[in-house]
Amino acid sequence: MAAPIIRFQHVKKAFGPKVIYRDLNLDVYPGETITVMGGSGVGKSVLLKMLIRLLDYDDGTIHFHQQEISHLNELDIGVVRQRIAMLFQGAALFDSMSVGENVAYGLHEHYRHKMSDRDIADRVNWALSLVGLPGIEEMRPADLSGGMKKRVGLARAIAVKPEVLLYDEPTTGLDPINTERINHLIRGLKARIGVTSIVVTHDMKSAFTISDRIAMVYRGEIIAVGTPDEIRASRDPHVADFIEGKAPVTEDVTTLLNS
Ligand SMILES: Nc1ncnc2c1ncn2[C@@H]1O[C@H](COP(=O)(O)OP(=O)(O)OP(=O)(O)O)[C@@H](O)[C@H]1O
Ligand SMILES: [Mg+2]
């Protein structure tokens, strides 16, 4: 098996007295789609944010290739954020900009003066085509449906040709058809551009459809990780409860640790 491109090792994270991770360990391999599941508030978004250092961690290490994230300076962090693109929960677009300007946003940020207007226009067209929305550059976000907005957000993330894509709840709030469309896109991007993906979701059906592996967060650590079949067959009662929809909706590790 290839070496992991991302490694979380013994990561600890708390907000004041509130412990989110007490021992987070996870390896992500090149080209895989790994889904991180867990109840609301367990720290799924925090996991993604620590990886691109939108949040610092208290202890342990996170490596991207051979680089330890907390050791990087601002310039190197900028490079990491180009190589690891994030589709944020809610996928907020800038309403004052056209769709094309939204998709080009990261290109201006990362390739200032290095790409011609023509190259940028071509790249925006490429990204919009990949998400099945070619030619809508002139439209405004306000004129798009929720599903289209998510796809434009995805086009913005892939426009910089990242090695890794982070999806935070990509299908939340979408109807079944748009959910299926996004799932199909996640699979398709893996096939077409060979991207490595970390997907955060509590949509079980999506997780089992799109994932090479699934990781389950519970009480400040990852309690199970494996292929969809392995997770389905897990004997861990917390995993089984979550799959069957019996898991508590919210988690507060501090309360659990103190109990
Ligand atoms: N910047 C922050 N400052 C203080 N607390 C935070 C911060 N970011 C997150 N938290 C807390 O950390 C916990 C985990 O948050 P996180 O957003 O990772 O949850 P989640 O698993 O993504 O939940 P959801 O499924 O609802 O999105 C929550 O209790 C949240 O309130
Ligand atoms: Mg979240």
Image (cartoon, rainbow, N blue to C red):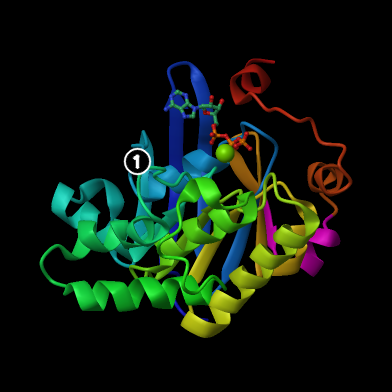
Q: Eyeballing the image, is 167 above or below 238? A: below
Which quadrant does the C terminus fall into?
A: top right
Task: Identify the element where label 1 is drawn.
Answer: loop
Image location of residue 157, percent across then percent down = 42, 61
Nearer to the camera, 19 or 97? 97
On the picture, is 45 further left or further right than 77?
right
Please name the amino acid that badge 1 sits on.
Leu
Q: What stretch is highlighted in magenta?
A: 224-234
Q: Which residue is rendered at x = 52% and y = 41% of the image?
A: 45
Judge whether residue 73 can be spotted in this image.
Answer: no
Nearer to the camera, 229 or 9? 229
Q: Which residue is rendered at x = 67% and y = 60% of the image?
A: 214
- The verdict on residue 77 being magenta is no
Image location of residue 15, percent across then percent down = 44, 23
Image location of residue 30, percent across then percent down = 47, 75
- The verdict on residue 228 being magenta is yes
Q: Eyeballing the image, is 246 above or below 259? A: below
Circle 1 Cα neighbour tier, 10 Å, few/some/many (<14 / 14–19 / ≥20): few
* Residue closest to the far left: 113
Image location of residue 120, percent across then percent down = 26, 72
Q: Quadrant of residue 32?
A: bottom right
Q: In which quarter of the image is residue 34?
A: bottom right
Q: Quadrant of ligand 2?
A: top right
Nearer to the camera, 69 or 204? 204
The residue where tag 1 is placed is: 54
**Does the numbered disc 1 mark a residue whose Cβ is under 8 Å from ligand 1?**
no
Q: Which residue is rendered at x = 54% and y = 50% of the image?
A: 143
Q: Which residue is rendered at x = 85% and y = 53% of the image?
A: 235
Judge whether residue 244 can be spotted in this image.
Answer: yes
